[in-house]
């Protein structure tokens, strides 16, 4: 079974988890990169005028991404990681799901968070990939390679 570990990371935390997960399961790694990178000011959640706050408040927001997954049909399972912003996935994750064809695929969510869980994130993302099975996975703030591998194996 071939797997992809796709991730968006604003500060590096999710990237670290994704890299370790990819190594643990032998999956391909893909970084979701915004056309316009996020600055520290963009990520200031205490500023109601910051880019991340504005995007999260607008359900139609779709930040542009640099590239798509090559040949997504080759993957059976996609592990999709991101930081939790305002109790859900950043809008760039919607962009990623809508611009790649993951029909018939299993998409397992994982995230990093300063304090909140995944909440309704899977439900929030289903409209962006209606022909895929989106599974609410796990928050990883503390982990080791064995923990990641044992968790992921249930989906492989």
Image (cartoon, helix red, strand yellow):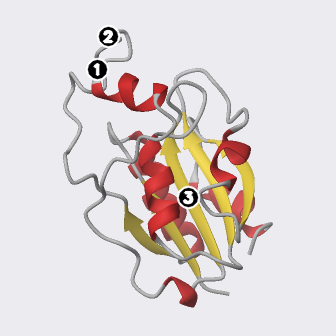
Residue wearing tag 3: 80
The quarter of the picture where residue 12 lies is top left
The answer to whether mark 2 and mark 1 are in CB contact below 8 A is yes
Left of 56 or right of it: where is 140? right
Q: How many marks?
A: 3
Circle nearer the viewer, 2 or 3: 2
Q: Position of residue 138 (x, y in %)?
A: 69, 45
Q: Residue furthest front?
A: 60
Q: Position of residue 23 (x, y in %)?
A: 49, 69
Q: Position of residue 151 (x, y in %)?
A: 73, 57
**Could you tell me how far apart the alpha carbons at marks 3 and 1 are, in whole angstroms?**
25 Å
Residue drawn at 25 percent across, 63 percent down: 66
Asked whether 63 or 67 is in front, the reply is 63
For the C terminus, the image quarter is bottom right
Residue wearing tag 1: 50
Q: Position of residue 46 (x, y in %)?
A: 37, 9
Classify mark 1: helix, strand or loop.
loop
Residue drawn at 39 percent across, 68 percent down: 30
For the N terminus, the image quarter is bottom right
**Could you tell me how far apart the alpha carbons at marks 2 and 3 are, in whole angstroms?**
27 Å
Residue count near mark 3 (Cα–Cα under 10 Å), binned few <14, some 14–19, many ≥20: many
Classify mark 2: helix, strand or loop.
loop
Classify mark 3: helix, strand or loop.
strand
Q: Which mark is residue 47?
A: 2
**Could you tell me how far apart the alpha carbons at marks 2 and 1 are, in whole angstroms?**
5 Å
Q: Earlier in the sequence, mark 2 or mark 3?
A: 2
Left of 8 or right of it: where is 76? right
Residue drawn at 31 percent across, 18 percent down: 44
Does residue 115 lie above or below 8 as drawn?
Answer: above
């Amino acid at each position: 079974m071939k797997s992809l570990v796709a991730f968006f990371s604003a500060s590096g935390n999710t990237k670290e988890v994704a890299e370790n997960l990819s190594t643990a399961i032998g999956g391909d790694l893909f970084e979701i990169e915004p056309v316009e990178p996020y600055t520290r000011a963009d990520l200031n959640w205490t500023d109601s005028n910051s880019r991340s706050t504005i995007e999260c408040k607008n359900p139609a927001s779709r930040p542009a991404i640099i590239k798509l997954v090559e040949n997504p049909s080759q993957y059976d399972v996609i592990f999709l990681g991101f930081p939790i912003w305002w109790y859900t996935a950043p809008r760039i994750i919607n962009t990623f799901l809508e611009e790649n064809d993951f029909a018939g695929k299993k998409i397992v969510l994982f995230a990093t968070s300063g304090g909140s869980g995944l909440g309704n994130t899977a439900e929030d993302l289903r409209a962006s990939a209606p022909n895929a099975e989106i599974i609410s996975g796990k928050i990883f703030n503390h982990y080791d390679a064995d923990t990641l591998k044992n968790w992921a194996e249930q989906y492989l």
